[in-house]
Image: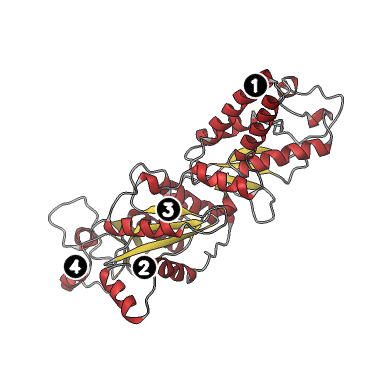
Amino acid sequence: MEFLPDRDSELFAAAPASAAVFVLRGDEASEPYVGKSSNLRRRLQRLLGPSVGQSRKLNLRDRVRWVEWNSTGSDFEAGFLLYQMLRREFPKTYDKRLRLRFAPLVKLILDNPYPRATITVRISGAKSKAQYFGPFVTRVAAEKFANDSLDLFKMRRCVDELHPDPAFPGCIYSEMKMCLAPCFKGCSDEEYEAEVGRVQQYLESGGQSLVREIERRRDEASTNLDFEGAAALHARLEKVKAAGAQLPEIVRRLDELNGLMVQPSAERECVAMFKIVGGRICDPVTLNVGQQAEASHLATRPQSMEARITHALATVGPPQLRSALERMEHLALLKRWYYRTAKAGEIFLTESSGELPMRRVVRGVSRVFRGEKPSGDLSETAGDYWKFRAREAGITEN
């Protein structure tokens, strides 16, 4: 809307007294003012209303000519929309305005002749063969999981570029038999590649691949009456399970981080659905779930809620991100929402088949629409997901 100071009441009456993201524009030479508010009308009255006496509060009444806004139904939607607006309006400085904290990830560096794992917040370009697992809540949590996990394998920990030389003395890990020591040809390249493959399978299955392997060996030792060996394997199994228990549900290989986030909508009797594709957030699609929508569908063509959700998601295309930086920013927004202690909305991640758990999604849509908190028995646990992945990889229990 155009803002005219002598007709400011028209703008204030049109602006909703609810949450919104807004842009205030002046002449072409001035930069816009971008912000979000839980009550847009009150915020505009403070910024554009007549100033009273000597006040130090910001007043843009004499500088603003146009006001743009988008109503939002949740804090996540407001944050995502604010990110998009700031990126569009301030392409060179938006990162300083947002102050996003990138998500910590476990990076498996596969481009190196002798792969290793590290912790990073940066994602390489499309040409890189590296695999990323996350997002973790903090770098400390990612480092603890990585250290506890790598203690179970003999992949190298050093960060040097290796030039294997039998004369090289090695390091403390090779002395403790915790590394295959490719640095002084303590193993063949094939042996080291096989160990890296075990680590990769461990990360992809959330530890379940190693759990199944140790359980099988423990049962074999018990069958052969090697009770000491079985006890040692059982103790090792407890360490593996303790390392895997550190993984929240959302921690997955990034290209498999797919799902659906359901948020309250600014529109009446609706919810907003954000499709998650490889850790990237798609633009929201609105789903009307009120009584009027149900009556309309029943009158025209009977259609279940599951079918309506599937149809709505089919219209959503994948986000067109132009750089790895944008993917890191989307992941930061997702991580910031997921690890909050109190948050609105729910998220549903895909199962091992790549499909959404639609029955749970339907129940979640109903809860979000009614403003109810998710019930514990309906939420997917990380252990269930990793068991699905293990079975998919052909790792079965004896």
Disc marking residue 347: 3
Query: Which residue was labeled with disc 4?
Result: 12
**Direction from residue 116 to residue 138 in the image, left or right:** left
How many C-alpha atoms fall within 10 Å of the one at disc 1: few (<14), some, or many (≥20)?
Answer: few
In the image, taking residue 375 as reference, residue 248 lies left or right, namely right
> Is 153 situated above or below 44?
above
Identify the residue at horizontal 24%, vertical 71% (top origin): 3
Q: How many marks?
A: 4
For badge 1, the amino acid type reads: Ala
How far from the left and from the top, in percent, is residue 185? 84, 30
Mark 1: secondary structure: helix
Q: Which residue is mark 1?
A: 232
Q: Are marks 4 and 2 in contact (CB under 8 Å)?
A: no
**Residue placed most toward the observer, 221 or 173:** 221
Task: State which mark lies toward you, 4 or 1.
Answer: 1
**Image quarter of residue 33:** bottom left
| Snapshot quadrant of residue 51 | bottom left
Q: Sequence order check: which comes first, mark 4 or mark 3? A: 4
**C-alpha gap between disc 4 and disc 1:** 72 Å
Q: Amino acid at mark 2?
A: Leu
Instruction: Evaluate whether residue 32 shows in this view.
Output: no
Q: Secondary structure at mark 2?
A: strand
Tell me which numbered mark, 4 or 1, is placed earlier along the sequence: 4
Q: Nearer the viewer, mark 3 or mark 1?
A: 1
The answer to which of marks 2 and 3 sits earlier in the sequence is 2
Q: Residue at x 37, y 54 (%)?
A: 76
Task: Name which residue type carries label 4.
Answer: Phe
Q: Earlier in the sequence, mark 4 or mark 2?
A: 4
> Of the residues tagged 4 and 2, which is closer to the observer?
2
Q: Is residue 313 visible?
A: yes
